[in-house]
Amino acid sequence: MPEADDPRSEAERIEAGRLFFARAWRFVAGAARAADLPGTEAIEVAFAGRSNVGKSSLLNALTGRQALARTSNTPGRTRELNLFSADAGVAIVDMPGYGYARAPKREVAAWTRTVFDYLRGAPRLRRVYVLVDARHGLKPNDAEALDTLDRAAVSYQIVLTKADKVTAAALPEVIAATTGQIAKRPAAHPQVLATSSTTGAGIAELRAEIAGMASPAHTEG
Ligand code: GDP
Protein backbone atom coordinates (compact mmCIF):
# COMPACT_ATOMS: atom_id res chain seq x y z
CA MET A 1 0.00 0.00 0.00
CA PRO A 2 1.54 3.37 -0.95
CA GLU A 3 2.46 5.49 2.04
CA ALA A 4 0.13 8.46 2.37
CA ASP A 5 2.95 10.95 1.85
CA ASP A 6 4.49 9.17 -1.16
CA PRO A 7 3.92 11.49 -4.13
CA ARG A 8 4.98 8.90 -6.71
CA SER A 9 2.56 7.09 -8.99
CA GLU A 10 2.04 3.36 -8.60
CA ALA A 11 4.01 2.75 -11.81
CA GLU A 12 6.94 4.77 -10.44
CA ARG A 13 6.92 2.81 -7.18
CA ILE A 14 6.84 -0.51 -9.04
CA GLU A 15 9.74 0.57 -11.25
CA ALA A 16 11.75 1.70 -8.21
CA GLY A 17 11.12 -1.73 -6.67
CA ARG A 18 12.25 -3.49 -9.82
CA LEU A 19 15.48 -1.49 -9.95
CA PHE A 20 16.08 -1.97 -6.25
CA PHE A 21 15.91 -5.75 -6.54
CA ALA A 22 17.84 -5.83 -9.82
CA ARG A 23 20.93 -5.15 -7.71
CA ALA A 24 23.33 -7.96 -6.93
CA TRP A 25 21.91 -9.40 -3.72
CA ARG A 26 24.24 -11.65 -1.80
CA PHE A 27 24.33 -13.74 1.33
CA VAL A 28 26.41 -11.88 3.91
CA ALA A 29 26.38 -14.00 7.05
CA GLY A 30 24.41 -16.36 9.22
CA ALA A 31 24.40 -16.41 13.01
CA ALA A 32 22.45 -18.13 15.74
CA ARG A 33 22.76 -15.05 17.91
CA ALA A 34 21.67 -11.63 16.73
CA ALA A 35 24.73 -10.08 18.37
CA ASP A 36 26.98 -12.09 16.03
CA LEU A 37 25.50 -10.64 12.84
CA PRO A 38 27.60 -7.91 11.25
CA GLY A 39 26.08 -4.45 11.16
CA THR A 40 25.22 -3.31 7.65
CA GLU A 41 22.86 -0.75 6.25
CA ALA A 42 20.57 1.86 7.65
CA ILE A 43 17.42 -0.24 7.55
CA GLU A 44 16.44 -3.89 7.86
CA VAL A 45 13.38 -5.84 6.86
CA ALA A 46 12.97 -9.41 8.04
CA PHE A 47 11.12 -12.47 6.78
CA ALA A 48 9.58 -15.07 9.06
CA GLY A 49 7.30 -18.05 8.60
CA ARG A 50 6.66 -21.71 9.24
CA SER A 51 9.13 -24.13 7.73
CA ASN A 52 8.10 -24.94 4.17
CA VAL A 53 5.90 -21.84 3.85
CA GLY A 54 7.91 -20.79 0.79
CA LYS A 55 10.26 -18.28 2.42
CA SER A 56 13.36 -19.24 0.43
CA SER A 57 11.36 -19.28 -2.78
CA LEU A 58 9.97 -15.82 -2.05
CA LEU A 59 13.42 -14.38 -1.29
CA ASN A 60 14.73 -15.91 -4.49
CA ALA A 61 11.77 -14.49 -6.45
CA LEU A 62 12.24 -11.02 -4.96
CA THR A 63 15.94 -10.90 -5.72
CA GLY A 64 15.76 -12.83 -8.99
CA ARG A 65 18.58 -14.98 -7.62
CA GLN A 66 17.55 -18.60 -7.84
CA ALA A 67 20.03 -19.89 -5.29
CA LEU A 68 20.29 -16.93 -2.96
CA ALA A 69 18.22 -18.20 -0.08
CA ARG A 70 19.13 -21.83 -0.57
CA THR A 71 22.02 -21.09 1.73
CA SER A 72 19.63 -20.42 4.55
CA ASN A 73 17.78 -23.68 3.89
CA THR A 74 20.88 -25.85 4.22
CA PRO A 75 21.24 -27.90 7.39
CA GLY A 76 22.86 -25.89 10.13
CA ARG A 77 21.64 -22.61 8.70
CA THR A 78 17.92 -23.18 9.17
CA ARG A 79 18.08 -22.22 12.85
CA GLU A 80 20.07 -19.09 12.15
CA LEU A 81 19.38 -15.51 11.27
CA ASN A 82 20.65 -15.07 7.72
CA LEU A 83 21.60 -11.68 6.40
CA PHE A 84 21.35 -10.60 2.75
CA SER A 85 22.53 -7.33 1.27
CA ALA A 86 22.85 -5.48 -1.99
CA ASP A 87 24.35 -2.35 -0.42
CA ALA A 88 21.03 -0.71 -1.20
CA GLY A 89 20.17 0.89 2.11
CA VAL A 90 17.96 -2.01 3.19
CA ALA A 91 19.32 -5.33 4.41
CA ILE A 92 17.14 -8.44 4.45
CA VAL A 93 17.15 -10.72 7.46
CA ASP A 94 15.86 -14.24 6.93
CA MET A 95 14.62 -15.47 10.30
CA PRO A 96 14.68 -19.15 11.19
CA GLY A 97 11.57 -21.09 10.22
CA TYR A 98 9.27 -22.24 12.98
CA GLY A 99 6.57 -24.83 13.45
CA TYR A 100 8.30 -28.09 12.68
CA ALA A 101 5.81 -30.89 13.28
CA ARG A 102 6.17 -32.09 16.86
CA ALA A 103 9.06 -29.75 17.59
CA PRO A 104 10.31 -30.34 21.11
CA LYS A 105 9.54 -27.55 23.56
CA ARG A 106 13.19 -26.60 23.89
CA GLU A 107 13.38 -25.99 20.13
CA VAL A 108 10.39 -23.68 20.25
CA ALA A 109 12.02 -21.91 23.19
CA ALA A 110 15.28 -21.62 21.23
CA TRP A 111 13.44 -20.08 18.27
CA THR A 112 11.67 -17.59 20.49
CA ARG A 113 14.93 -16.65 22.20
CA THR A 114 16.85 -16.17 18.92
CA VAL A 115 14.09 -14.11 17.39
CA PHE A 116 13.23 -12.11 20.50
CA ASP A 117 16.91 -11.26 21.09
CA TYR A 118 17.19 -10.12 17.48
CA LEU A 119 13.99 -8.05 17.71
CA ARG A 120 15.07 -6.41 20.95
CA GLY A 121 18.46 -5.42 19.58
CA ALA A 122 17.38 -4.31 16.10
CA PRO A 123 16.66 -0.59 16.14
CA ARG A 124 17.04 -0.47 12.34
CA LEU A 125 14.36 -3.10 11.75
CA ARG A 126 11.44 -1.50 9.94
CA ARG A 127 9.15 -4.43 9.33
CA VAL A 128 8.86 -8.17 9.62
CA TYR A 129 7.04 -9.90 6.78
CA VAL A 130 5.33 -12.93 8.25
CA LEU A 131 4.68 -15.48 5.53
CA VAL A 132 1.54 -17.58 5.75
CA ASP A 133 0.54 -20.34 3.33
CA ALA A 134 -2.54 -19.12 1.44
CA ARG A 135 -4.00 -22.62 1.55
CA HIS A 136 -3.88 -22.90 5.32
CA GLY A 137 -4.26 -19.40 6.72
CA LEU A 138 -3.00 -18.58 10.22
CA LYS A 139 -2.11 -21.64 12.29
CA PRO A 140 -1.63 -21.75 16.06
CA ASN A 141 2.16 -21.52 15.75
CA ASP A 142 1.80 -18.51 13.44
CA ALA A 143 -0.30 -16.91 16.15
CA GLU A 144 2.46 -17.63 18.68
CA ALA A 145 5.01 -15.97 16.39
CA LEU A 146 2.71 -12.95 16.06
CA ASP A 147 2.44 -12.84 19.86
CA THR A 148 6.24 -12.60 20.03
CA LEU A 149 6.24 -9.76 17.48
CA ASP A 150 3.42 -7.93 19.28
CA ARG A 151 5.34 -8.29 22.55
CA ALA A 152 8.45 -6.83 20.92
CA ALA A 153 6.31 -4.05 19.41
CA VAL A 154 7.82 -4.60 15.96
CA SER A 155 5.73 -3.65 12.94
CA TYR A 156 4.85 -6.71 10.91
CA GLN A 157 2.78 -7.57 7.87
CA ILE A 158 1.24 -10.83 6.72
CA VAL A 159 2.25 -12.05 3.26
CA LEU A 160 0.30 -15.00 1.90
CA THR A 161 2.47 -17.39 -0.11
CA LYS A 162 1.60 -19.98 -2.77
CA ALA A 163 -1.44 -17.92 -3.84
CA ASP A 164 -1.40 -19.95 -7.08
CA LYS A 165 -2.54 -22.94 -5.01
CA VAL A 166 -5.93 -21.43 -4.17
CA THR A 167 -8.64 -20.50 -6.66
CA ALA A 168 -9.19 -16.91 -7.73
CA ALA A 169 -12.55 -17.07 -5.93
CA ALA A 170 -11.09 -18.39 -2.66
CA LEU A 171 -8.15 -15.98 -2.40
CA PRO A 172 -10.20 -12.89 -1.39
CA GLU A 173 -11.84 -15.02 1.31
CA VAL A 174 -8.48 -16.08 2.73
CA ILE A 175 -7.33 -12.46 2.67
CA ALA A 176 -10.52 -11.28 4.38
CA ALA A 177 -10.37 -14.01 7.03
CA THR A 178 -6.69 -13.30 7.78
CA THR A 179 -7.31 -9.55 7.87
CA GLY A 180 -10.05 -10.17 10.45
CA GLN A 181 -7.78 -12.38 12.56
CA ILE A 182 -5.06 -9.73 12.86
CA ALA A 183 -7.37 -6.72 13.23
CA LYS A 184 -6.90 -6.47 16.99
CA ARG A 185 -3.17 -7.15 17.01
CA PRO A 186 -1.35 -3.99 18.03
CA ALA A 187 1.74 -4.28 15.79
CA ALA A 188 0.09 -5.76 12.68
CA HIS A 189 -0.05 -3.83 9.41
CA PRO A 190 -3.73 -3.95 8.40
CA GLN A 191 -3.09 -4.95 4.78
CA VAL A 192 -2.56 -8.61 3.95
CA LEU A 193 -0.51 -9.17 0.78
CA ALA A 194 -0.84 -12.19 -1.52
CA THR A 195 2.10 -13.58 -3.47
CA SER A 196 3.15 -16.53 -5.58
CA SER A 197 6.79 -17.28 -6.26
CA THR A 198 5.62 -19.64 -9.00
CA THR A 199 3.55 -17.16 -11.04
CA GLY A 200 5.21 -14.00 -9.77
CA ALA A 201 1.90 -12.60 -8.50
CA GLY A 202 2.39 -9.87 -5.90
CA ILE A 203 6.20 -9.91 -6.22
CA ALA A 204 6.47 -6.52 -7.96
CA GLU A 205 4.25 -4.93 -5.30
CA LEU A 206 6.27 -6.41 -2.45
CA ARG A 207 9.49 -5.24 -4.10
CA ALA A 208 8.03 -1.74 -4.35
CA GLU A 209 7.08 -1.75 -0.67
CA ILE A 210 10.51 -2.81 0.50
CA ALA A 211 12.29 -0.40 -1.83
CA GLY A 212 10.05 2.37 -0.52
CA MET A 213 11.52 1.85 2.95
CA ALA A 214 15.00 2.77 1.76
CA SER A 215 16.13 6.34 2.06
CA PRO A 216 15.39 8.46 -1.05
CA ALA A 217 19.12 8.76 -1.71
CA HIS A 218 19.29 5.02 -2.24
CA THR A 219 16.07 4.48 -4.19
CA GLU A 220 16.90 7.22 -6.68
CA GLY A 221 20.51 6.13 -7.15
P1 GDP B 1 10.88 -22.53 3.13
O1 GDP B 1 11.13 -23.75 3.96
O2 GDP B 1 9.88 -21.63 3.78
O3 GDP B 1 12.11 -21.80 2.72
O4 GDP B 1 10.13 -23.03 1.81
P2 GDP B 1 10.67 -23.26 0.33
O5 GDP B 1 10.85 -21.97 -0.38
O6 GDP B 1 11.81 -24.20 0.37
O7 GDP B 1 9.38 -23.95 -0.34
C1 GDP B 1 8.78 -25.09 0.20
C2 GDP B 1 8.03 -25.84 -0.92
O8 GDP B 1 6.97 -25.04 -1.41
C3 GDP B 1 8.91 -26.15 -2.12
O9 GDP B 1 8.54 -27.42 -2.61
C4 GDP B 1 8.56 -25.06 -3.12
O10 GDP B 1 8.72 -25.47 -4.45
C5 GDP B 1 7.09 -24.82 -2.82
N1 GDP B 1 6.70 -23.43 -3.12
C6 GDP B 1 7.31 -22.31 -2.65
N2 GDP B 1 6.69 -21.20 -3.12
C7 GDP B 1 5.67 -21.63 -3.90
C8 GDP B 1 4.65 -20.95 -4.67
O11 GDP B 1 4.55 -19.72 -4.73
N3 GDP B 1 3.75 -21.75 -5.32
C9 GDP B 1 3.81 -23.10 -5.27
N4 GDP B 1 2.88 -23.78 -5.92
N5 GDP B 1 4.75 -23.77 -4.56
C10 GDP B 1 5.67 -23.05 -3.89
Image (cartoon, rainbow, N blue to C red):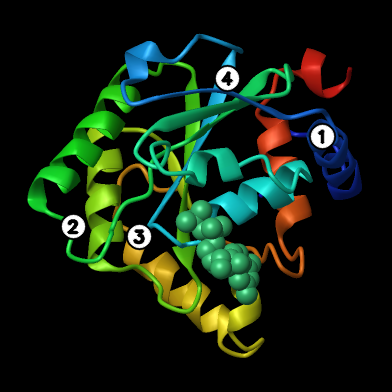
Amino acid carrying label 2: it is Ala
Residue 103, numbered circle: 2
Earlier sequence position, callout 4 versus callout 3: 4
Picture quarter containing residue 7?
top right
Mark toward the viewer: 3 or 1:
3
Question: Where is mark 4, residue-wise?
Answer: 43
Q: Residue furthest top?
A: 39
- Identified at 37% across, 33% down, the residue is 154
Under circle 3, the secondary element is helix
Amino acid carrying label 4: it is Ile
Under circle 2, the secondary element is loop
Q: Is residue 179 visible?
A: yes
> Does residue 164 appear left or right of residue 73 in this picture?
right
Q: CA distance from mark 1 to mark 2?
A: 47 Å
Label 4: few (<14), some or many (≥20) within 10 Å? some
Query: Is the residue 106 above or below the residue 38 in the image?
Result: below
Question: How far across and down, in percent of the image, does residue 31 sit?
Answer: 39, 23
Residue 182, numbered circle: 3
Amino acid carrying label 1: it is Pro
Q: CA distance from mark 3 to mark 1?
A: 29 Å
